[in-house]
Amino acid sequence: MPTQMLEKREHVAMPVPPPAELAEAAELRAAVATYARRVRRLKINVAAWALGTIAVTALWVANQWQANGAFETFGHEGDPGQWNPTLWALVVGLWSLVVGIMALRVYFERPGADAAGRLKYHAVAWVYGMLVLTPLWALIEWQDNGAFERLSANSQPGSWEPWILYIGGIWALVAAALLVYSNRKTRRLTPR
């Protein structure tokens, strides 16, 4: 079987993609790398949260047992058998809030996510945040002022400060402003 010999160096030229496609590919690679970093950080934080929750719970139980004896009820007066859950709930709840929002970001802001994905992320993060913060607010106000009777800032028994409403409102406004800003920036950078 005869074979043909090449007398000159011949190169097979690969077609070069246009610059726009190269830029999109580079952006996609950068987005995938950022997403991979987020996933790694989330895994580390979930493991730290789990171990930290176990450690904080063990310390809280040991402290409450030593201070108030065997558990009978939750309370804040410090009577024998009353265990105060406020500090434990704050530590575990706020840490859960941070790790949960990280998980939502990993879920909703995948590479190639659009403005609708960011909107869903901010909306779900706000709902999740309010679901975590509202029981913490109720626990803190119950410890400070007893059973709920009215929303008020006068620090009387039964008067609960409505700071949870301020946090929820400010968070919603900041999320909306960030969405408006990012949408304007995206529209400005998108070629027409």
Image: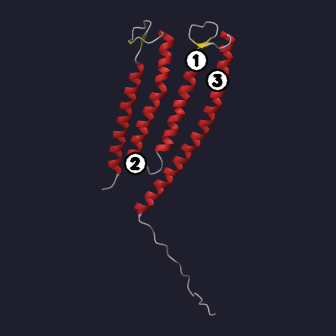
Residue flagged by tag 2: what amino acid is it?
Asp
Residue flagged by tag 1: what amino acid is it?
Pro
Residue nearer the viewer, 99 or 181: 99
Q: In which quarter of the image is residue 151?
A: top left
Q: Is residue 145 above or below residue 51?
A: above
Residue drawn 46% across the image and 28% down it: 131
Task: Please state which of the two labelled residues, at mark 3 or mark 2, is closer to the viewer.
Answer: 3
Q: Earlier in the sequence, mark 1 or mark 2?
A: 1
Residue drawn 41% across the image and 62% down it: 19
Residue flagged by tag 3: what amino acid is it?
Thr
Q: Name the residue under label 2.
A: 114
Is the residue marked by circle 2 packed among few (<14), some (14-19), or many (20+) residues within 10 Å?
few
Residue drawn 35% across the image and 45% down it: 185
Is the residue marked by circle 3 packed among few (<14), some (14-19), or many (20+) residues within 10 Å?
some
Disc sitting over residue 85 in the figure: 1
Is the residue marked by circle 1 packed among few (<14), some (14-19), or many (20+) residues within 10 Å?
some
Q: Are marks 3 and 2 in contact (CB under 8 Å)?
A: no
Image quarter of the N terminus: bottom right
Residue 113 % position (x, y): 43, 49
Residue drawn 52% across the image and 32% down it: 98
Q: Distance between the residues labelled 3 and 2?
A: 40 Å
Residue nearer the viewer, 10 or 110: 110
Residue 107 % position (x, y): 49, 43
Disc sitting over residue 77 in the figure: none
**Helix, strand or loop status at disc 3:** helix
Residue nearer the viewer, 65 or 108: 65
User: In the image, is 12 to the left or to the right of 182?
Assistant: right
Q: Mark 3 points at which residue?
A: 57
Q: How far apart are marks 3 and 1 (CA)?
A: 10 Å
**Helix, strand or loop status at disc 2:** loop
Task: Please state which of the two labelled residues, at mark 1 or mark 2, is closer to the viewer.
Answer: 1
Q: Earlier in the sequence, mark 3 or mark 2?
A: 3
